Amino acid sequence: MARFTKSQCRPCPTRAQCTSTADGARTVGFPPRELRDLQLRFRTEQQTPPWKGRYAIRSGVEGTVNEFAHGHGMRRCRYRGQGKAHIQHVLTAIAVNIERLSKLPPAENAPAPRRPTAFQDYLDQRELPLPKSWRTLGT
């Protein structure tokens, strides 16, 4: 650890970059060499594509956990008992999936419309109007 007194710290031209304390004194701590080397090694490893790929997966999982905990109140359970709590978690997960699917844009390749039935072909050939419902046929 290095300590600088007020008389050493105040006249320094780069003091504003170093500290913002009112008294002007500065204390700087240095980690042990082993810890510093370990930090440098891990920081350089974090810049590699394999590490970023693994972290992207973790980031997605952490985001989902955060969404459940804060967005859907999953830190507390409404029911007592492991079975009921499990059902609450499963139903909440289903609701979240439905909510996510509803926000997706419509698919570009929409399924083709169904072929007309034989009854619809019969009506079209004879230029008969298609009844609105089978319930209204007798009225």
Image: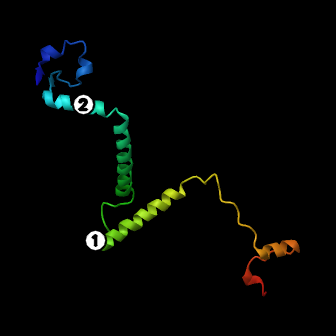
The circle on residue 111 is none
Q: Please name the amino acid that badge 1 sits on.
A: Gln
Q: Are marks 2 and 1 in contact (CB under 8 Å)?
A: no
In the image, farthest residue toward the right:
126
Mark 2 surroundings: few (<14), some (14-19) or many (≥20) residues within 10 A = few
SS assignment at label 1: helix
Give the vertical position of 39 relative to 54 (above or below): above
Instruction: Give the percent coordinates (x, y) of residue 139.
Output: 79, 87
What residue sits 61% from the left and 54% below the top? 107
Residue, disc 1: 82
Which of the marked residues, 2 or 1, is nearer the chain's N terminus? Answer: 2
Could you say which quadrant of the image residue 53 lies in? top left
Could you say which quadrant of the image residue 135 lies in? bottom right
Q: Is residue 40 left or right of residue 99?
A: left
What residue sits 55% from the left and 53% below the top? 104
What residue sits 83% from the left and 75% below the top? 122
Please indicate, yes or no, whether residue 129 appears anywhere in the rendered image.
no
Please indicate, yes or no, whether residue 14 appears anywhere in the rendered image.
yes
Mark 2 or 1: in front is 2
Question: The N terminus lies in which quarter of the figure?
Answer: top left
Q: Is residue 120 left or right of residue 86?
A: right
- Label 2 – label 1 distance at C-alpha: 44 Å
Instruction: Give the percent coordinates (x, y) of residue 120.
Output: 79, 73
SS assignment at label 2: helix
Residue, disc 2: 41
Q: Please name the amino acid that badge 2 sits on.
A: Arg
